[in-house]
Image (cartoon, grey):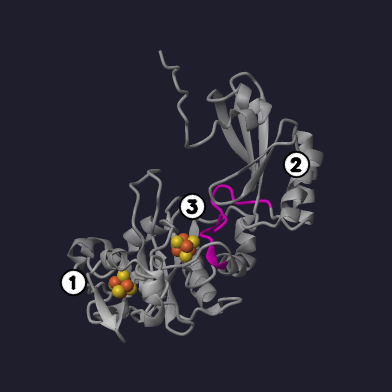
Amino acid sequence: MAEMRTPIESGVPDNRPFLHPALLKNYGSWRYHDRPRPGVLHHVAHSGDEVWSVRAGTQRQMDVYTIRKLCDIADQYAEGHVRFTIRSNIEFMVSDPAKVEPLVDVLTKNGFPVGGTGNSVSMIAHTQGWLHCDIPGTDASGAVKALMDELHSEFIREDMPNRVHLSTSCCEINCGGQADIAIIVQHTKPPKINHDLVANVCERPAVVARCPVAAIRPALVNGKPSLEVDEKKCICCGACYPPCPPMQINDPEHSKLAIWVGGKNSNARGKPTFMKMVASGLPNNPPRWTEVSEIVKKILYTYKEDARSWERVSDWVERIGWPRFFEKCDLPFTKYLIDDWRGSRANLNASTHIRF
Ligand code: SF4
Ligand code: SF4
């Protein structure tokens, strides 16, 4: 009889070999947790064991020297174990309260701010930007760095009405997800086609199939197989660019940035919500993206002042209504915020301009 073949498992690896021993021993058996100070979580197990997790912000995309530095800090000041949160913060676990303050000090001294817990502005969840991805219309990490420099004080404190999650997405078909406040690329012109390259680089049926509004057709240009775009139909989404880079849609002037608010992924206290666009056509202006930062800060601090305790941004807007949101944040409500795409009927209830 043939020998049984061992199945090849793929997916999430078993994390248990890498857990801090106290976390492994008390897995799923915690009595309570609290936060002795911003950036520090304290877990108490039924067995009586206690663990302090010190959370610090990182730049997410790290060079090897930074990673070595964080590992050295983990070996010398913590107990050799770290983990990363989904917002790219790093957490160091210790089982002795006397180790917490020296760990906080060494992290702060090395430029890793301790915070991001509770009702703070946590690290911005961001995608990869120019460093890794092949389709970005802007940088994600650069915009995050510029914005977090200005929001540093909100990361290390916990005095927002509720937690605030920000995100950036460096293309329009982004992987950024939903956030309380999101910065997203917005293309404003249809792609310009580099016809000389299409036949060599693109699989034309794949590009035609990719367009959500059927605006792309095969065409012969200068005797060569190429593509054409019906610009009246095109919604400038950028989806044709990844499978076919000659569909050039990124443009230093016409690729802009938009701000969306009110998204939430979790089920905590209320159902998840989709975010809605509240500012559009902002210049894509590295290295500090000042126009974007100004609007994000305006929305954030209006929310901070006006929201009730425990309201997320979406709850706050729901309570005051979109017209008041635009008034309070000094944002103009323009035609660009109205979803007038002919297929938008299903979205109307999710946009800022109509509420049933
Ligand atoms: S948001 Fe878009 S460009 Fe940025 S990493 Fe994700 S897929 Fe790539
Ligand atoms: S940008 Fe989007 S809508 Fe326009 S042609 Fe490309 S895939 Fe179609």
Dot placed on the residue nearer the N-terminal end, 3 or 1: 3
Image location (x, y in percent) of residue 289: 55, 76
Query: In this view of the protein, can residue 168 be seen by the observer?
Result: no
What's the residue type where badge 3 is placed?
A: Asn
| Location of the N terminus (image quadrant) | top left
User: Of callouts 3 and 2, which one flags the residue occurring earlier in the amino acid sequence?
Assistant: 2
Residue at horizontal 53 percent and vertical 47 percent from the top: 86
Residue 154 sits above or below residue 199 on the image: above
27, above or below 180, in the image: above
Residue at figure coordinates x 78%, y 37% from the top left: 99
Residue corresponding to mark 2: 74
- Would you name the residue on which mark 1 appears? 342
Question: For disc 3, does the CB lie below 8 Å from ligand 1?
Answer: no
Which label number is shown at residue 162? 3
Residue at the image point whose x is 71% and y is 55% from the top: 112
Question: For the C terminus, which image quadrant?
Answer: bottom left
Q: Nearer the viewer, mark 3 or mark 2?
A: 2
Looking at the rendered structure, the secondary structure element under dot 1 is loop
Q: Are marks 3 and 1 in contact (CB under 8 Å)?
A: no
- Horizontal and vertical percent for residue 75? 78, 39
The picture quadrant for ligand 2 comes to bottom left
Question: Which residue occupies the foreground of this view, 20 or 248?
Answer: 248
Task: List x then y, in percent, for residue 14.
Answer: 55, 31
Which residues, given as a range, are shown in magenta? 114-130
Nearer to the camera, 4 or 313: 4
194, 15: nearer the viewer: 194
Q: Main secondary structure of the magenta part?
A: loop
